Image (cartoon, rainbow, N blue to C red):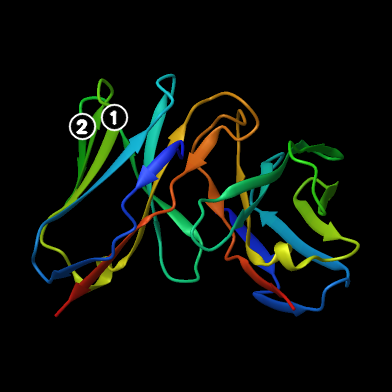
Amino acid sequence: RKEVEQDPGPFNVPEGATVAFNCTYSNSASQSFFWYRQDCRKEPKLLMSVYSSGNEDGRFTAQLNRASQYISLLIRDSKLSDSATYLCVVNRNTGFQKLVFGTGTRLLVSP
Amino acid sequence: SQTIHQWPATLVQPVGSPLSLECTVEGTSNPNLYWYRQAAGRGLQLLFYSVGIGQISSEVPQNLSASRPQDRQFILSSKKLLLSDSGFYLCAWNVGAVTSEKLFFGSGTQLSVL
């Protein structure tokens, strides 16, 4: 089992739709969590951190459920420019590879 | 502002040939520097990190090596490439503790070993 698991998708949605991605992690000692966005053949870029109380940044809302060990990302009013792969990242703060990246969920927003 | 430069963007190399990928960071001092590899269908895998000149950490023995000859320069090398070395290589940096989460990535090098 992978330490960070994501549905690879693709999620195909029309413009204006609301879409949600989930991510599960196996290491209960994980301390912090993030969503990165990666466009095709480009570098990942930090989208937002995920806080225990949930947090919002414009059309993006991130939630953390420590008891169930999952993280979610909600995108409202999808734009064509939201088409990308969204990487779930978990900091377990131990070992060599402290940041563990999921394989990503691909989102395709169509007109 | 800080910037990170990584080159080349794409590289096609024959099996057994050497490799040298370079990464430089501007606008910051004493950054932590990282080399990641992203293979198809897999998450980013950390290959090496460095917290200072000449300091290289790696966990998994592999066909690659890294060096940090200057504060803001990080080099990924191989003497003889293998087919399995193909992938998307990303340099990254941050400051503070290595556990600091926010990573800033270079634009990546797509390496194809044939």
State the SS at label 2: loop
Does B23 sit above or below residue B56?
A: below
Q: Is residue A28 left or right of residue B55?
A: left
Other residues around mark 2 within 10 Å, as few (<14) / some (14–19) / many (≥20):
some
Q: Quadrant of residue B85?
A: bottom right
Residue drawn at the location 47% of the way across and 57% of the way down? A44
Residue drawn at the location 77% of the way across and 52% of the way down? B74
Q: Amino acid at mark 1?
A: Tyr
Q: Quadrant of residue A1?
A: top left
Q: Is residue B21 left or right of residue A9?
A: right
**What is the count of numbered marks?**
2
Q: Report whether residue A58 is seen.
A: no
Q: Quadrant of residue A56?
A: top left
Q: Report whether residue B53 is seen.
A: yes
Marks 1 and 2 close (CB-CB < 8 Å): yes
Q: Is residue B89 left or right of residue A51?
A: right
The residues bearing labels 1 and 2 have C-alpha atoms spaced at a distance of 5 Å
Q: Is residue A70 left or right of residue B32?
A: left
Q: Chain of mark 2?
A: A
Q: Position of residue A24 (x, y in %)?
A: 33, 37
Q: Position of residue A18 (x, y in %)?
A: 10, 57
Question: If the image is split into quadrants, where does the C terminus of chain A sit?
Answer: bottom left
Compare residues B33 and B41 and report the one nearer the observer. Answer: B41
Q: Chain of mark 1?
A: A
Q: Amino acid at mark 2?
A: Gly
Residue furthest right as drawn: B79
Residue drawn at the location 49% of the way across and 68% of the way down? A42
Q: Which residue is mark 2?
A: A54
Q: Which residue is mark 1?
A: A51
Q: Position of residue A74 (x, y in %)?
A: 18, 48
Residue furthest front as drawn: A1
Q: Position of residue A85 (x, y in %)?
A: 36, 61
